[in-house]
Amino acid sequence: MNRIKDLRKARGMIQRELETALNLGKGNVSKYEKEDHGLSVDNINKLCDYFGVTADYLLCRSNVPTPSAVTEADAELLRAFHAAPEHLQKAARTMLGLDGQADKTKEKSEAS
């Protein structure tokens, strides 16, 4: 299963318009949508780039169309949080109203 047809229709495109936009042969989009023909890695990449979605979303392996972007500043905060002593992590969780998630966070870091 794939989401090509849904993504194409959401843009108000007919199959031939998508084929032209991606330089695909006539009838290829129909075959891809019906899954009569497998998608090459190159064409998966083209479709993902064109629609701005992940391959997992395109191929129905995920319901999340795009990965969430983590800025470098956010990543730095996460690193600082995980490097902080346990009592400071607990204080931060309390201040942010995340008290119930303390055990889950600890379990994840121990599993890593």
Image (tube, rainbow, N blue to C red):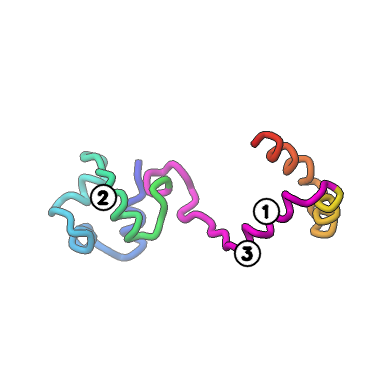
Write down the residue under mark 3: 73
Write down the residue under mark 1: 79
> How far apart are the two marked residues, 2 and 1, measured between alpha carbons?
37 Å
Closer to the chain start, of discs 3 and 1, is 3
Mark 3 crowd level (few <14, some 14–19, many ≥20, 10 Å Cα): few
The foreground one among 7 and 107 is: 107
The foreground one among 111 and 3 is: 111
Q: Which mark is residue 106?
A: none
> Which residue corresponds to the image point at 31% horizontal and 65% vertical from the top-left?
12
Helix, strand or loop status at disc 2 = helix
Mark 2 crowd level (few <14, some 14–19, many ≥20, 10 Å Cα): some
> Which residue corresponds to the image point at 22% horizontal and 51% vertical from the top-left?
29
Q: Which residues are magenta?
A: 57-86
- Residue 24, by quadrant, is bottom left
Q: Is residue 32 left or right of residue 99?
A: left
Q: Is residue 87 left or right of residue 70?
A: right
Mark 1 crowd level (few <14, some 14–19, many ≥20, 10 Å Cα): few
Q: Quadrant of the N terminus?
A: top left
Q: Is residue 76 above or below residue 112?
A: below
| Residue 95 inside the magenta-drawn segment | no
- Residue 22, by quadrant, is bottom left
Closer to the chain start, of discs 2 and 1, is 2
| Amino acid type, label 3 | Ala
| Residue 79 inside the magenta-drawn segment | yes
Residue 58, position as x, y percentages in the image:
38, 49
| Amino acid type, label 2 | Asn
